[in-house]
Image (cartoon, rainbow, N blue to C red):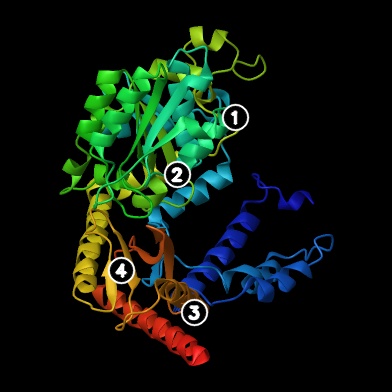
Amino acid sequence: MRSQLLNGMTTERYRRSVTDGVERVAARLAATDRPFTGVTPDALAPLIERIDLDRPLYDTTAVLDELEDVYLRDAVYFHHPRYLAHLNCPVVIPAVLGEAVLSAVNSSLDTWDQSAGGTLIERRLVEWTAGRLGLGQAADGVFTSGGSQSNLQALLLAREESKTDSPAKLRIFTSEAGHFSVLKSARLLGLSADSVVSIPVDRDRRMRTVVLARELERCARAGLVPMAVVATAGTTDFGSLDPLPETADLCARYGTWLHVDAAYGCGLLASPTRRHLLDGIEHADSVTVDYHKSFFQPVSSSALLVRDATTLRHATYHAEYLNPRRTVRERIPNQVDKSLQTTRRFDALKLWMTLRTMGADSVGELFDEVCELAAEGWRLLAADPRYDVVCEPVLSTLVFRWVPAAATDPALTDRANRYARTALAASGAAVVAGTEVDGRQYLKFTLLNPETTPSDIAAVLDLLAGHAEQYLGDSLDRAS
């Protein structure tokens, strides 16, 4: 049906369809009074399974009606102030507008002849980010699908720059609180599991550089090759920042590539008050940033930045039909020369629209708000005898554990915490995350919504405690 193709003859249909979709979403957002309905996979799956994809509805209004039942009604809404679970942020309107524009124009950011202005906008944003990082005039980078891809490419560059003929000798050092994508990337790069050396953390969940120094020295004595150190600026579980200046000094001493995973902490680049927390990042060889975590951008919007643009050559392959070698001599800017991806969305437009509409300071002020909210949440937890909180937050994450008033088997307390999280989600009243700390079950707030208040935090803590107490009471009754 050619009438469904977006072109100069179907602009009115496009306008009506998109407007109808926007109205549906707007109405749902306005009416949403909780972050989740609590629907289970068993309840929702049959609704989707019974849809016959070979029998279209031929009408976008009917399709949107159906979408209400299979998606919009039960979606997890990150914009709600009691969504406190993962690193999912509410999004700013200019970025959503950018999403609509980029989807309709559908530029592919692999070559100049497919994107033109899009190529230059992405390059300008890479330059802007590298400037905020302080990486220097030789820096470069490329947008990616997310932090995992950025980390993978960074470690690919580090592997190639290590210049060894024996991959079995390569070692990667990262903290035990670092992201799982480091180990996953090592395996994808053909390295063994023992190539990744886990460095313990201190009480604030920061990598212990004394241990890192000892492990680097041990590596050198054993004739192994320290391929890379991955420092984290904003760990997923704790929001902790590894000591970047000390880590950079060690990398310089041992000739080791320094990669900083700032997927979460990159919001500090825009902060009017907290940028100093990233001091030392300017010494990195590569940096991961996820704008879709702390710049309030829709998924996906991420980038890999490198200090030395020439290192990106390790991801470069030329195809005669796409980016022949002569285009380099002709100074034609093909972004595929830097990327692990070929076809790639113009995700940079969302950040561009945000910066041109709001400015970086406004984005940074929003991130400052959630960091201040976390500090207030920590004070609430520290004063609440029902909870044990792991560490004072630097960014916007709180990790804590409900503890019963009377001495109880720790394993039973673990189960009570897990139950509390599950029961809360099933109620739809709030959504929180969970994790494991030192072998025990903990709960987690990831605060990325400036609309969340201390009152919201206090109310959710009360709900969690109620569920945990109910579970413990029921368990003790059954045991008696």
Q: Earlier in the sequence, mark 1 or mark 3?
A: 1
Q: Earlier in the sequence, mark 4 or mark 2?
A: 2
Instruction: Residue type at mark 4: give it.
Output: Glu
- Front-most of residues 217 and 311: 217
Is any atom of residue 120 visible in this view?
Answer: no
Instruction: Residue type at mark 3: give it.
Output: Ala
Q: Which image quadrant for residue 444? A: bottom left
Q: Position of residue 362 (x, y in %)?
A: 24, 52
Residue beneath disc 2: 301
Q: Position of residue 279 (x, y in %)?
A: 19, 36
The answer to whether 16 appears left or right of 171 in the picture is right
Q: Which tag is nearer the camera, tag 4 or tag 3?
A: 3
The residue at 24%/72% (across/down) is 381
- Between the C-alphas of marks 2 and 1, the distance is 16 Å
Q: Earlier in the sequence, mark 4 or mark 3?
A: 3
Residue beneath disc 1: 342
Q: Earlier in the sequence, mark 4 or mark 1?
A: 1
- Between the C-alphas of marks 4 and 1, the distance is 38 Å
Instruction: Residue type at mark 2: give it.
Output: Ser
Q: Which residue of the protein is positioned furthest toward the right in this rendering?
A: 54
- Between the C-alphas of marks 2 and 3, the distance is 32 Å
- Tag 4, which secondary structure? loop
The residue at 42%/19% (across/down) is 224
- Tag 1, which secondary structure? loop
Q: Earlier in the sequence, mark 2 or mark 3?
A: 2
